[in-house]
Amino acid sequence: MIDSATEKAIQFKISNLIDGSRIYPRGFIAYKLSNAQPEATPIEASSSVKVLSATVQTSTEVIGGKMVPHPEVEELYYAVLNNPLLLKEFNIREKIIRLAKGIFTKNPGNWVALQVLSPAFTTLHFDFIKDIIAFAQTGRTALNNHTWRSLLKGEVTPRKLEQRSDPKVVLAYIQETNLLTTDTVLLTNILKHTSGFIQLLTFLHILVGNTETAEDGISAANANFIRIGRMI
């Protein structure tokens, strides 16, 4: 059971991030950028799940019953995958930074707190975020990108609450991690490493891109636009 102090702290951190955010196929929450459009006209569905002591009402953009990935991130990721030399171009690097700033927000710590609202935010999702920070600190990750893409499939439903990350643990991690204070600090430390740009783009792909197979990914029942309802 979450204590009231932890809940109030998280609610304070996420208060300015709720509107316009959505859940992506693997279960992470990030802004829906205004210039990002899905490849096809989505249908809408809605559901709600009890998170903390608030009701989170969701309105879901889906195609074929699955969440829509971030089209800009996906287009750039696969373009670079097919032609790695693109990473040498200034405009490509600039676009990666712009997309990362939009996803992590000006305060990445608050963005991490926002993940608590996702019904699919498991301990594994939290471990991936910690691996992003580990790369920023050391230039290395605990698991390689292929393993993370395989593990994070968006399979978890709100019914599996025992697999959810503990909000108190998440909040404590945010408070003790200096690299989460601003987007500039986080991105500067990621990009100082030799493989920084390709690794950052891959992080974004895992956070807001599509899953590896059509069978995986968050379904329409599990959320998109996040909106805090009345406290109950």
Image (spheres, grey):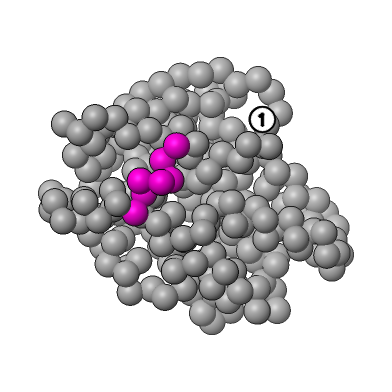
Q: Give the range drawn in magenta.
A: 13-19
Residue reaching furthest bottom? 138
Which residue is located at x 75 percent, y 50 percent? 76
Q: Estimate the x, y position of residue 196 in percent, counting from the top left.
A: 67, 72
The image shows residue 17, relative to residue 59, as above or below, that is: below
Which secondary structure, mark 1?
loop
Query: Which residue lies under the disc numbered 1?
Result: 38
Residue 187 rendering spot, x and y as whole percentages: 59, 69
Q: Does 108 appear above or below 209?
A: below
Using the image, determine if residue 215 lies above or below residue 163.
Answer: above
For the point 65% across and 73% down, the residue is 191
Does 115 lie within the magenta span?
Answer: no
Residue shown at 72% from the left, 52% from the top = 77
Give the residue type at disc 1: Pro
Residue 232 visible in image = yes
Q: Characterize the magenta stretch by its predominant secondary structure.
A: loop
Q: In which quarter of the image is residue 174?
A: bottom left
Residue 138's x, y, as percent? 54, 82
Image quadrant holding the C terminus, namely top left
Residue 17 in the magenta stretch? The answer is yes
Instruction: Classify mark 1: residues with Cα within 10 Å, few (<14), some (14-19) or many (20+).
Output: some
